[in-house]
């Protein structure tokens, strides 16, 4: 699409980029191609909308991954306490001289 309205056919949305062939206003300046300006504006707004949608989806993804990692960490902490907690209790009982089921084997 050309930047300016065509002097020979102002209704043609193709327009022209040649200032000599462009329609002129009262001041002698070329008249802008309204169809091109509308297309450029629509493209810019569509791109902005798509980028904001993508940013929203990426932020939701980041929140979900953060929650998943938090839950994984909590689960691993519980697992570590379940596996290693008995050993720590056994060592503490042995130091104080208290017998436990784990220490006596019953």
Image (tube, rainbow, N blue to C red):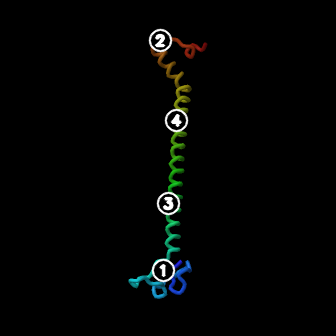
Front in this rendered view, residue 11 or 97: 11
N-terminal-most mark, 1 or 3: 1
Above or below, 49 against 61 in this view is below
Q: Which residue is mark 3?
A: 48
Q: Are marks 4 and 2 in contact (CB under 8 Å)?
A: no
Q: Which residue is mark 4?
A: 73
N-terminal-most mark, 4 or 2: 4
Front in this rendered view, residue 1 or 102: 1
Mark 3 to mark 4 CA distance (whole Å)? 37 Å
Above or below, 65 against 1 in this view is above
Where residue 66 appears, x then y in whole percent? 51, 42
| Nearer to us: label 3 or label 4 | 3
Residues packed near mark 3 inside 10 Å, few (<14), some (14 to 19) or many (20 plus): few
Where residue 96 appears, x then y in whole percent? 45, 13
| Nearer to us: label 4 or label 1 | 1
Q: Are marks 3 and 2 in contact (CB under 8 Å)?
A: no
Q: Are marks 3 and 4 in contact (CB under 8 Å)?
A: no
Above or below, 100 against 62 in this view is above
Residue at horizontal 52 percent and vertical 23 percent from the top? 85
In the structure shown, which secondary structural element does the residue marked by tag 4 occupy?
helix
Q: Are marks 4 and 1 in contact (CB under 8 Å)?
A: no
Image mark for residue 97: 2
Above or below, 73 against 103 in this view is below
Q: Quadrant of the C terminus?
A: top right
């Amino acid at each position: 699409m050309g930047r300016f309205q065509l002097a020979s056919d102002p209704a043609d949305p193709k327009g022209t980029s040649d200032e000599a062939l462009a329609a002129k206003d009262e001041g002698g300046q070329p008249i802008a191609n309204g169809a091109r300006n509308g297309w450029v504006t629509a493209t810019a707004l569509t791109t902005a909308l798509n980028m904001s949608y993508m940013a929203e989806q990426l932020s939701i993804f980041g929140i979900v991954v953060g929650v998943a990692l938090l839950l994984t960490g909590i689960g691993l902490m519980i697992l570590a306490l379940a596996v290693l907690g008995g050993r720590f209790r056994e060592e503490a009982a042995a130091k104080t001289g208290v017998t436990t089921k784990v220490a006596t084997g019953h």
